[in-house]
Image (spheres, helix red, strand yellow):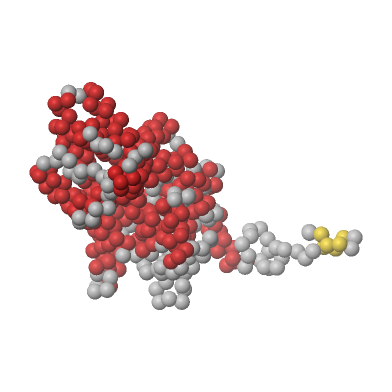
Amino acid sequence: MPDPIAIAGATRPVLWNITPAMVVWLYASSAIGLGVFAWGIARRVRVWRIGLPERRTDQWRRRVRRLALDALAQRKVLRELGGGLPHALLFFGFLALIVATTVLMVHQDFGLHIMIGRYYLWFQSLAANVLGLFALLALLAAAARRYLLRPQGLERREPQDGLLLAALFLLLATGFAVSGLRIVLSGDPWAAWRPVARATGQALAAVLPASSLAGMHRVLWLTHVTLWVGVLAAWPFTKLGHAVFAPLALYFGSLERAPELPRIDFEADKPALGAKDPFDLTWKQLLDLDACTECGRCERACPARTAGFAISPKRMVLALRDHVRANAASLLAAHALRRTDPARFQQLRAEMPVLAGVVIAGDAIWACTTCRGCEAACPVGIEHMRLMVQLRQNLAMEQAALPDGLAQLPRQLELREHPFCGVPVDRHAWFAPALTAGGREVAP
């Protein structure tokens, strides 16, 4: 049985076998990667700020609870185990490793020796090691699902998807290799608490010459650090960005089960007739575009798409997201003139592509049944319906682009005061009073 006194002092050396030049590379490259990461997040926030104001900070306790359940516990993600389980394992694995790395930094750089004792053994070693293995297996499952099973609705962006999966896999694999070689070469007395790393180190020691192990440890350490910095810098510009944006969308999401659909304020001086361009969207709607994980659950839940109509809630969100990102510079330049030069601002808006009918096809907009199935299925709380209705409002009231059947409705109301064709003008004649037969009322 382990000595309690020894357990209380359990820890490991930091930066073992690492030269001063390698330490300089660690801190310099990390600073650059963190700077690019922050710059990428700031770019997205700047775009959100062009949106209309909206209050989404009330009832913070309910919002925190939903964030804990749907983001940290992955509640909605795990409703579909096929893609949800690998995602959850990857999330928990990377979360544990990021926490462990942060603790290591605090322990080493700030002189707060917290990576010690039972905490070091149970979490920093055993839990992080096992969860890291789960994350590695989850990446293999994700690759198999994407390239072998190919489920319906899974967005494909090659080669970005493959490069991202490969980078994350190599990041985890080199981490296990570095830890394993340290265990083998240093004779770590607590090696049993890192079973995956120890097995990796023993496997490498069995196939590599003993004289090359120390050098290989340094090469793998540099590779691991460089991969991490690259992933960190690319984070806001790839699908990994949803790890930041999705929790925000969940926290600021509507707390109502069926939020009220947007109405047009016709009493305003210049009422906005739906969503013509990104300036007609709120900051939360712009955030939703970046929060999309491209999982396709909204598409699979859409009854109109299942029935064969040309509609995809996912494609709507991604098309709008790509449009906003492609025109971010123009949008920000126009937004800067919003208060200082309103006339020029309106001129720039007039030159922008119309969302409804141009960025999003009109047929897709009118095919929506407004059932909210997409919103119920979305694991990150994107509010598709409000956006769809705003696009529809713009088509109907600003562009007068109505489908054939619906286009007759306002004409019939104008001529006959009711929506039906082939019946007299008298608005009361299209329904007849109940007829009495045998002392009971029956329909005509």
State whether residue 62 is above or below residue 29: below
- In the rendered image, the quadrant that contains the N terminus is top left
Q: Left or right? Give the position of 80 relative to 334.
A: right
Q: Left or right? Give the position of 170 relative to 142.
A: left
State whether residue 150 is above or below residue 66: above
Residue 84: give x, y in percent of width and height: 45, 43
On the question of residue 232 being in view, the answer is yes
For image coordinates 34% across by 65% down, the residue present is 51
Residue 409 found in image quarter: bottom right
Q: How many marks?
A: 0
For image coordinates 41% across by 52% down, the residue present is 72
- In the rendered image, the quadrant that contains the C terminus is bottom right
Give the camera-side residue of 97 and 61: 97
For image coordinates 40% across by 42% down, the residue present is 89
Give the camera-side residue of 84 and 301: 84
Residue 4: give x, y in percent of width and height: 33, 45
